[in-house]
Amino acid sequence: MIRVGIVGATGYSGVELIRLLAGHPHVKVANLYSSTSEGEALASVFPHVQALELPVLAKIDAGQMGADNDVIFLATPAGVSAELSPELVKNGAKVIDLSGDFRLKDGAAYTQWYKRQPAADEWLQKAVYGLSEWKKEEIAGAELIANPGCYPTAALLGMIPLAKSGWVNPKSWIIDAKSGVSGAGRGVSLGVHYSEINESIHAYKVSSHQHTPEIEQELTGQAELEQLIQFTPHLVPMTRGILVTAYGQLEKAAALSELQELYQSSYAGKPFVRLRQPGSHPRTKEVYGSNYCDIALHVDDRTGRVIVLSVIDNVVKGAAGQAVQNMNIMLGLPETAGLPLVPLFP
């Protein structure tokens, strides 16, 4: 069995990793780590996992952790992984980082958008951006994976085929995105207080969200042509889910059937992207608890725009599920291993 360690097991992404890995046929959760709950049982924090046989939460020691685990998932706040990951890799472990520390190749851009010092440039360049459907070959040979952000996962899966095709003006992209509250993590703050968010919806970090350069970087890399996006995230009063509505100005007339064929070709053989019927309206509820991204295409002949709808569960495909998918690819395991193939419904 593959020995897996999880740093940050007391957060939403960490405990979701445990839920998924508990059903993985090739993996054992060997070690759990926490900087705040050392020596405690995870069930004392999350009673819903009490039926699982899990190790107690241990202290973080990079040298020992590298020796004790084959793969380590880092579900940590920004800045932690930048210091921890190089030591873990040097001590023999493969690392999948769920924070944003290694997603941007440009350290100056990281400082601009995250307002903190970047990881060493050597490791920024070494890290492989883990968008599973589009980086499979690179992931397979990686030691350090930068797991994509939740918004970028939904946006990029919806937009990359069009960006690569050249059908869309590369500076016309507008992304309207809506996320459930779990995307903010388990920390307590007024911004996610029930009384503040219930019966309400609001935009935040307009023109300043840290996922903006991540989306542009990866969209540009795939298209081999600079892409410019306008990205506005919104918080909606639900626990899980992201809906991205992306708009692009068509450079030439395109029938909806042509675009549908483009996407069918792009995602053939990629088990976690489900292309819906043209003109349909996927809902976050239809991917709840799963690693799927559902995509639907629309064309507005009046404005000459293509509209792409994509939905994911932000805690699964947007975090823990994609991390497990990346681990499977990295280790040569079946890509779907440990990942639920039927979403929760209702």
Image (cartoon, helix red, strand yellow):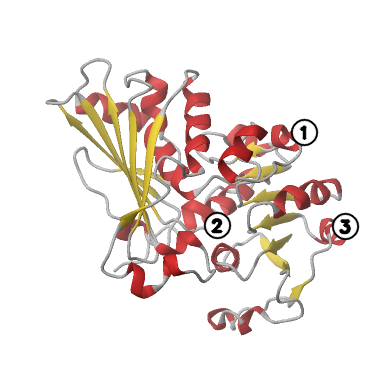
**What is the quadrant of the C terminus in the image?**
bottom left
Left/right of residue 181 with respect to residue 320 in the rendered view: left
Mark 2: few/some/many CA within 10 Å (<14, 14-19, 20+) = many
Q: Can residue 215 be seen at all in this image of the molecule?
A: yes
Mark 3: few/some/many CA within 10 Å (<14, 14-19, 20+) = some
The residue that appears at 54% across and 44% down in the rendered structure is 148
**Residue kind at label 1, given as amino acid type:** Glu
Is label 2 in a helix, a strand or a loop? Answer: helix
Left/right of residue 337 with respect to residue 287 in the rendered view: right
The picture quadrant where one finds residue 343 is: bottom left
The residue that appears at 32% across and 56% down in the rendered structure is 202
Task: Single out the mark in the foreground, 1 or 3.
Answer: 1
Q: Earlier in the sequence, mark 1 or mark 3?
A: 3
Asked if the residue under mark 2 is in contact with the one under mark 1, i.e. CB atoms within 8 Å, the reply is no
**What is the quadrant of the N terminus in the image?**
bottom right
The Cα atoms of the two marked residues, 1 and 2, are separated by 26 Å
Task: Single out the mark in the foreground, 1 or 2.
Answer: 1
Return the mark for residue 47: none
**Residue kind at label 2, given as amino acid type:** Ala
The Cα atoms of the two marked residues, 1 and 3, are separated by 20 Å
Residue assigned mark 2:
320
Q: Earlier in the sequence, mark 2 or mark 3?
A: 3
Outermost residue on the top side: it is 252
| Front residue (pair 240, 285) | 240
Q: Earlier in the sequence, mark 1 or mark 2?
A: 1
Return the mark for residue 122: 1
Residue assigned mark 3:
63
Rendered position, 141 above or below 83: above
The picture quadrant where one finds residue 135 is: top right
**Residue kind at label 3, given as amino acid type:** Gly
Rendered position, 42 above or below 243: below
| Front residue (pair 310, 203) | 203
